[in-house]
Amino acid sequence: MGGAGSGRWEMRVTRMTTDGLPRLDVRELARAGALQPGLSATVRWAGGMSVATSVVADAPDDLVVAYGGRAGTKARAPVAERFVLSRTPCTFGGDRMWVVCPGCSSRCAVLYAVGGWFRCRQCHHLTYPSTRATR
């Protein structure tokens, strides 16, 4: 039974990693105070992509993300997406902020931009770089 290498597939890389992708982290936005209704923030990445975020004043559970401009050498049409924010209570008081992925409706803390759309790691079929590390 088995032989040399029988327990491994061909060691082909089949999924992209999250390393180097533009990410929208609601934990960082919450620390910066940008998730207060009526306030906005701008997140910039290398390569010229920037994202303007704002929480709608009359709907405090809606996060509006506007992005576009240049990504590398390609010009992009401006895009505005609306994400739903969710809160869960913490054990010792306060609450934790989550964003609901529009692709699969799961709560997550980080959305990644692939192909011009922010979705969760599972929707974009991404993996962490640590899964590719050798022993």
Image (cartoon, helix red, strand yellow):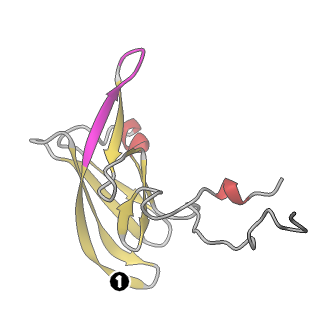
Q: Which residues are magenta?
A: 84-93
Residue, x 24% and y 61% (percent of image)? 81
Identified by mark 1, the residue type is Ala
Q: Going by the image, does 26 lie left or right of 131?
A: left
Label 1 secondary element: strand
Farthest-out residue, front:
1
Residue 116 falls in image quadrant: bottom left
Residue identifier under label 1: 75
Farthest-out residue, top:
92
- Find residue 51 and report its horizontal and vertical position in percent: 34, 61
- Find residue 89 and report its horizontal and vertical position in percent: 34, 24
**In magenta segment, residue 32:** no
Query: Does residue 25 sit above or below 72 in this rendering?
Result: above
**The N terminus, quarter of image:** bottom right
- Find residue 102 and report its horizontal and vertical position in percent: 29, 56
Residue 93 falls in image quadrant: top left
Residue, x 31% and y 72% (percent of image)? 68
Q: Going by the image, does 36 lie left or right of 31?
A: left
Residue, x 38% and y 77% (percent of image)? 70
Query: Does residue 129 sit above or below 14 in this rendering?
Result: above
Q: Going by the image, does 129 lie left or right of 83?
A: right
Farthest-out residue, right:
4
For the stretch drawn in magenta, the main secondary structure is strand
- Find residue 40 and report its horizontal and vertical position in percent: 25, 48
